[in-house]
Amino acid sequence: MASTKKPCIPDTLPPDIEWNGLVRLVSQAISAIARYDGTLSGIVNSAVLLSPITVNEAVLSSKIEGTYATLGEVLQHEAGEVFEEEKKIDIQEIINYRKALLIAEDYLKDRPISMSLIRELHSVLMDSVRGQDKNPGSFRENQNWIGKRGRPIEEARFIPPNPIVMKESIDNLESFISMDIDDPIVQMAIIHAQFEIIHPFNDGNGRLGRMLIPLFLCQKKVLQRPVFYLSEFIEQNDLEYRDRLLAITEKGDWHGWVKFFLNAVIVQAERNTNKAQKIHDLYKKMKEEFIRITNSKHALAALDVFFSKPIVNASVFYELSSIPTKVTANNILRSLTEARLIKVIKEGKGQSPTVYVMPELINISEGKEVYQ
């Protein structure tokens, strides 16, 4: 039986919002984000310390789209571990996501978010992975739909706008992104939802839509760096997330969506604050331990390597730490291993160097005990 669903026609932005019912949540969301950003501002060299969180966001955002690779597997791959082809593709999708985030952060230093940037980020996301044959970096020119994998449009849960309407909606969304709205968090809620409703690409829309969240908040100076991620909350509340988006197009329920989004920000900001603080506390503790155990002027350089790459092989450690000789670097690694501050997860063999991990940092980043 043919579906009665038709391609949706997105609302013109800005939509009508019942502001009176949002005042309390908006205030809580602003406070939660401010606490998180304050925690970041107190962290020296936050780019290094929060690197594992950025990788983990790439892992979680890709997982929502059916990519199955862990933070540990991504880091082991970068440390030289060889995986089967299917896993390598999963890992590459995650690496692409992280690369796109870093490109966007650099872009935002002197330019605002634009559709040109979004297309560029899409081409990075789709490079050498599933979806690379679906016009990376170009808006779709055909009708897509959302439903069970492999099922026809007649069984779709949601049908985004047709290509002609889509282009009009994209122009409207770009204009809305450049507007100055009283509350940027509510504005971000609307931007994210509208991007997912428009679904402008043949693939990768979910990941790009989630990436826009920290980028926009950084552009609006709500965050000093775009390192606030919602993928953890979205994954855990996936059904309500999808239902709230569908309610916008079927019932015009922007109010319900914004409430859901604000609650997501409040919950995740608290989680992110705790995680960032734990990483900062670990760094301070490890700083003292690395200096004491190694008794070396290279202790902090060694520590920074492990915080930027919690799983690293001996060759990369030597290169990144700029320690003058391999003998000194290996002595430091041996001392840290004996003190159980780091752990060997793969012994060196032949031309393959030994691979090390800092277990506590991985466990904090993943929010569970992965390495003992």
Image (cartoon, rainbow, N blue to C red):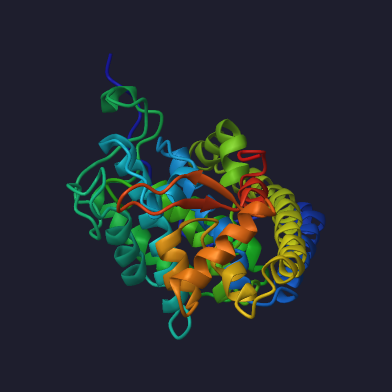
List x then y, in percent, for residue 110. Answer: 45, 86
Report x, y in % for residue 82.
32, 43
Residue found 64% across the figure and 49% down from its top: 261
- In front of the other: 195 or 58: 58
Pinpoint residue 240: horizontal percent, then vertical percent: 60, 34
Give the left or right position of residue 221, taking residue 94 as reference.
right
Q: Quadrant of the C terminus?
A: top right
Q: Which quadrant does the N terminus fall into?
A: top left
Q: Is residue 110 above or below residue 63?
A: below
**In the image: residue 226, left or right of residue 95:** right
Q: Nearer the viewer, residue 164 or 81?
A: 81
Displayed quadrant of residue 272: bottom right
Can residue 246 be spotted in the picture?
yes
Q: Nearer the viewer, residue 260 or 132?
A: 132
In this view of the protein, which residue sits in the foreground, 47 or 340? Answer: 340
Residue 298, above or below 339? below
Q: Is residue 185 left or right of residue 351?
A: right
